[in-house]
Amino acid sequence: MKQSNRPFLIAITGGIASGKTLVSKWFEEKGYKVIYADKIGHKFLDDEDIIDKLMEKFGKEILDNKKINRKKLGQIVFGSKEKLSFLNQLLHPKIRKEMQKIIDECEQLNTCLKNLCQVPILIFEIPLLFENKLEKAFDLVLNISSEKTIQIQRIIKKRKISEKRSKQIIDSQISDFEKQKLADVNIMNNTSLENLFERLENLLQIIKKMKHRNIKRLIEI
């Protein structure tokens, strides 16, 4: 993708309960626009074609008033790499297309869209970035990590599920070791919020001086 007028593209990723959304919210509070891949995916779960394919694969129990029950769907796919892969193959081409549309609109207007992003940096939170091999479509990939024991504690507290189930969800994703090798920047989120935010502030000052890469378009990956 040509540099031209497009914003500097950052991808935030990390394992479940690593703190990536906390980091995304920090950037939003600084005035940067963050696009959440999961929210885009949730929108496509209302498509009749998607509903039919998911019902055919997983059964009618995933439905609630003819709509996909995301909680039930998550209980089915997380913990099974095969089922999670099926869901990703169904949704991620549509998600990539929608994200690329946002990038293209910013570029075509020679500025970021009003009410979309106020600065020449556009951030995407993509939990399954590496699983879908999207890292080459961004100028910077930021991976947020936490120790597995801390992840498990956070999952149990937030989702009210067992330790065994929490481990299954973590193990259904690419290991943090692999993510750290693929990312440009890795930030550990094991200690205080003060420490995390200080590291993010230092990183932001570096990002402001960085140059665009020659990256791929999301729809070409």
Image (cartoon, rainbow, N blue to C red):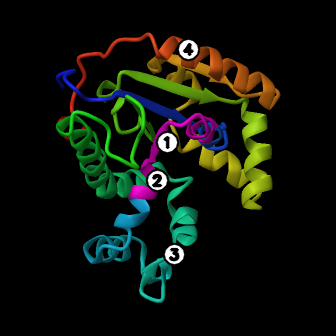
Mark 1 and mark 2: span between their CA atoms?
Answer: 8 Å
Rendered position, 73 above or below 120: below
Numbered label attached to residue 107: none
Q: Is disc 2 in contact with disc 4, using a CB cutoff of under 8 Å?
A: no
Numbered label attached to residue 38: 2
Numbered label attached to residue 69: 3
Q: Amino acid at mark 3?
A: Asn
Which residue is tagged 1? 127
Task: Label 1: state its secondary structure.
Answer: loop
Task: Label 4: state its secondary structure.
Answer: helix
Task: Label 2: state its secondary structure.
Answer: helix
Q: Left or right: where does residue 138 sit relative to residue 157?
A: left
Mark nearer the viewer, 3 or 2: 2
Quarter of the figure with residue 14: top right
**Region in magenta:** 23-40
Residue 69 in the image: state x and y as whole percent: 51, 75
Q: Amino acid at mark 1?
A: Pro
Question: Viewer-proximal residue, 171 or 68?
Answer: 68
Q: Earlier in the sequence, mark 3 or mark 2?
A: 2
Residue at 54% x, 20% y is 180
Badge 4 density bin: few <14, some 14–19, many ≥20, Cα 10 Å: few
Mark 4 and mark 1: span between their CA atoms?
Answer: 24 Å
Badge 1 density bin: few <14, some 14–19, many ≥20, Cα 10 Å: many
Main SS of residues in magenta: helix
Which residue is tagged 4? 205
Q: Earlier in the sequence, mark 4 or mark 1?
A: 1
